[in-house]
Image (tube, rainbow, N blue to C red):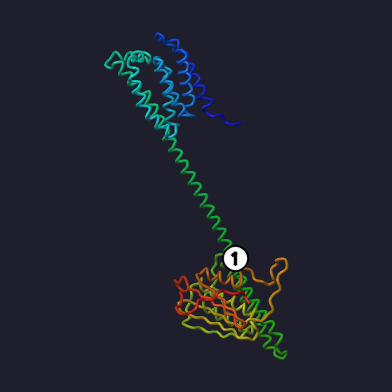
Amino acid sequence: MSKVPIWIWLHVPVGLLVALFGMGEVGGLRPGAGQSPLLVWCLVAIALGAAVALHQRLPAVALGLIWTACAAQMLAGIDLMLVNFALIVVAYGVARYGSAVTLWLSLVSIPIGYAIAAGYLPAHSVEVVHLLALRRFSSGALPASAIFALAAAAALVLPWLVGFAVRMRDRAVAARAESIRQERARIAAEQQRAQAQQLADMRDEQARLARDVHDVVGHSLAVILAQAESGHYLPDDDPARLKQTMANIAGSARNSLRDVREILAATGGVTGTGGESTGELDRLIDDVREAGVPIDATVVGTDRPLPPDLAVVAYRVLQEMLTNTLKHGRPGEPVLVTRRWDHGLTIEVTNTPLARAPDPPPEHGAPREGTPGPEFGVAGMRQRLSSVRGTLSVTQTAETYIARAWLPTSGRLREPAVPGQPQPAVPGPLP
């Protein structure tokens, strides 16, 4: 059941009582000759009652009814009656509930109405004073006209001021409530943003963990596979070389297990030490050499330590580059690994790609078997480098495959352009 508005169950009955009271005062009228105020006064009383009933719902209409009733009363020559003080309720209502235009019209109506009343009712001032039971004041220093003037001013001004004050209080309360609502909305938005950021950080951490595990396990398995395959070509009468190959396989597996443990420890908040120095890059190259891949490693410039975050990125990127040479490089062909130190660290790996027929198209949109996902391979290296403002370029021809990574050293945000030298080529597909 819907709630009945207050103006219906309270103001309408009050307005009806005002109208009935006004018509009840008709018996006290003393009309002059030729006047017939009965019907006019009934209409005036009804208009005053309607103005009281509508002073909250339709303040502008209530103000118009008051002016209409007063004008009809003056034209009919009707004396001031108690029901005329219904304008007190209307003055309060238009000041509190009226629109801006209605508020200003009511403010202008106060001096105009007072002026009209001062010109129309001075002859009835004694009757007004008696009507208001103010006889004891009229016999003193204040004449009846002065008492009437003060009473009229109070009836017009005070209700309007009270309504205006309540209007300002309501606006202040509404503004404070709106401010509280906006603050709560801001806090809720901040909480949602924090939760979204936490979720994004969690997903980034999961993607980073997946890339790390992919790099470590993929590299280790590639080295183990290369060494295991090389065992088929060892002579049966050379057990020392066979044992050395098995030892290399065990060492690669042991290093991979150690790296995975350090990755998991770092994820749990414990900082590992693997791959945090440039010396680890040499160990990485030696592991691939032991797998039977001829590697020509060169260092240009002065080798120097990197900050831990940059050292880990350099280690993982070189690890992925060497893994690609084991997977896709031509067996027996040398691999060139160059580390160049100048304004940053440039790691360049050059190998001869394995010639192969193009893969057949996938059926029904299924991915090709063995195709690395977007988080791995070249995309994974590029994401790692971009996290430290580094760059990656891949250049492929029929005879060479060059992967070149650049990462800054202390304080450098991006690779500066070298005048007279071509910019890195657009990365190509993984061979």
Within the image, what quadrant is residue 155 found in? top left
Percent position of residue 266, x then y? 56, 67
Judging depth in this view, the residue of 166 and 418 nearest the camera is 418
Q: Residue at x 60, y 69 (%)?
A: 211
Within the image, what quadrant is residue 71 found in? top left
Question: Which residue is labeled 1 in the image?
Answer: 207
For label 1, the crowd category at 10 Å Cα-Cα, with few meaning under 14, some 14 to 19 and many 20 or more, is: some
Where is the C terminus found, in terms of image quarters? bottom right
Percent position of residue 420, x then y? 46, 80
Judging depth in this view, the residue of 276 and 293 nearest the camera is 293
Name the residue type under label 1. Answer: Ala
Secondary structure of residue under mark 1: helix
Height in image: 81 above or below 206?
above
Outermost residue toward the front in this view? 34
Counting every numbered tag in the picture gives 1
Q: Residue at x 51, y 75 (%)?
A: 406
Height in image: 134 above or below 170?
above
Percent position of residue 150, x then y? 33, 21
Judging depth in this view, the residue of 16 and 170 nearest the camera is 16
Outermost residue toward the bottom in this view? 237
Height in image: 225 above or below 104?
below
Where is the N terminus found, in terms of image quarters? top right
Within the image, what quadrant is residue 241 found in? bottom right
